[in-house]
Amino acid sequence: MKLVKDDWKNAGVHFEIVERDTLLKIALKLSSSLKVEHILEQMVIALQKVVPFNMAVIFLINQETGEFDYKIAHGFSEDARRKLHLKLNQGVTGWVAQTGKAIIIPNVKKHPRYVEVDLRVKSEVSVPITIGAKTIGVFTLSSKYLYAFNQKQLKMLQAFASSASIALQNARLYRQTLQKREIDKDLQVAKQIQKALLQRRLPNSRRLHFSAYNKPSKQVGGDLYNVIQLTHGKIALSVGDIAGKGVSGAILMATLQAIYRTEIRRDLEADALLDLVNQQFAETIEVGRFATFFHSLIYPDERKIEYCSAGHNPAVVMHENGKYELLEATGIILGLTKDANYSKKNVAFEPGDVLVAYSDGVTEAENKNDEQFGLKNLLTAIKQAKNQNPTGIKKHILNNLRDFSAQTAHQDDITIVVAKYIK
């Protein structure tokens, strides 16, 4: 009798060794791939070496939506496959995903949570795929026979799930890394394109000198500026600010820039030009998107600036004597309605005067106490530096802005354009 017991004991030890060896080979096989789809296919093949079954389905949880992504099924009919798109709160699989607990169902007909997808299924086992306390997926094995699965098999499947979870997590991290690299690459291209859209050489003349600065809060931004030499000595100067940052803002920025630079060559008066730009911009963009925009025409011979402002921050004309004028909005923001009309205004621009146009990233920059830089600080900076050249004025504004913000990161794009009538 003792010999029989030893034989059974030795047989049990041998079986456990075979189990461990099988699981090790499975773990190595799964970890050899960094493609989610390939790992899922290998999982189904490997599961057949662990536990006998007729049908299998693997669900992964979409980390963004929190819902199941039905990934792979084996052994089901086409009609049954169409029924496999379950919600996270549906069926036994949903319960396993939410609780993180494995379950054996000896007879599916008697289980209240079971959702029938194939009439041939008599029993099943569902096991969560987890990383720590987080469930990232569930696999379910089904059988045509009642009581097809036992606790020993369940332990094997849980060990299998542990190996699979590591392989899937590695594959997901690898995919995310590739996607991030691709996004970073696209952003670098977008950054270069956007940089090319912003002028590096400004049309300085004997009487008018210019300087400009643009810094996106992200890799790409939604601010734009233009300083364009037109006929009869006049110069167009504009600053725009798209609602929204990042890639979406950059796309709209490029759209508005293209429209403006095309129409500015028609030599229209300021109000007619802005009416036309708004009409085309409103017809192009989707509902809910808009931009603020300041457009001006500098006439050095007539010593004046003609301007229109579509809801933009008031540009500043700082006169040589220290008095200033704010060029307030003369119409609504661009893009709300294509039928908007803009009025034009004129302001004197004499030798020694300075024009500063900017985006709200300047006045709305905050310090560590959540206080904004504001128009008052901007006016002070311009007045302090008004006798310098445009580059010096620009640098003085930026230095004051940096001193004010200190270590606080800018949450918005920053654009400044300075024009000075040289005496």
Image: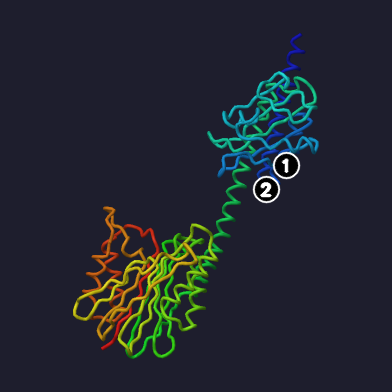
When the figure is inspected, residue 142 is found, relative to residue 300, above or below; the finding is above
Query: Left or right: where does residue 219 sit relative to residue 304?
Result: right
SS under mark 2:
loop
Q: Position of residue 1 (x, y in %)?
A: 76, 8
Query: Left or right: where does residue 59 sit relative to residue 264?
Result: right
Q: Position of residue 283 (x, y in %)?
A: 54, 66
Query: Would you say residue 158 is visible in this rendering?
Result: no
The structure residue drawn at horizontal position 43% and vertical position 79%, both measured from the top left corner, is 200
Amino acid type shown at disc 1: Gln
The structure residue drawn at horizontal position 41% and vertical position 90%, both measured from the top left corner, is 232
The structure residue drawn at horizontal position 26% and vertical position 64%, both measured from the top left corner, is 403
10 Å crowding of disc 1: few (<14), some (14-19), many (20+) = some
Viewport quadrant of the C terminus: bottom left
The disc label shown at residue 33, or none: 2
Q: Position of residue 328 (x, y in %)?
A: 32, 69
Foreground: 138 or 114? 114
Amino acid type shown at disc 2: Ser
Determine the residue located farthest toward the left in the rendered image.
321
When the figure is inspected, residue 15 is found, relative to residue 232, above or below; the finding is above
Q: Quadrant of residue 161?
A: top right
Query: Would you say residue 352 is visible in this rendering?
Result: yes
> Which residue is under mark 1?
42
Q: Position of residue 26 (x, y in %)?
A: 70, 38
Determine the residue located farthest toward the top in the rendered image.
1
10 Å crowding of disc 2: few (<14), some (14-19), many (20+) = some
The structure residue drawn at horizontal position 79% and vertical position 27%, both measured from the top left corner, is 119
The disc label shown at residue 158, or none: none
Foreground: 39 or 322? 322
Foreground: 375 or 278? 278
Given contact means CB atoms under 8 Å apart, are the residues at marks 2 and 1 in contact?
yes
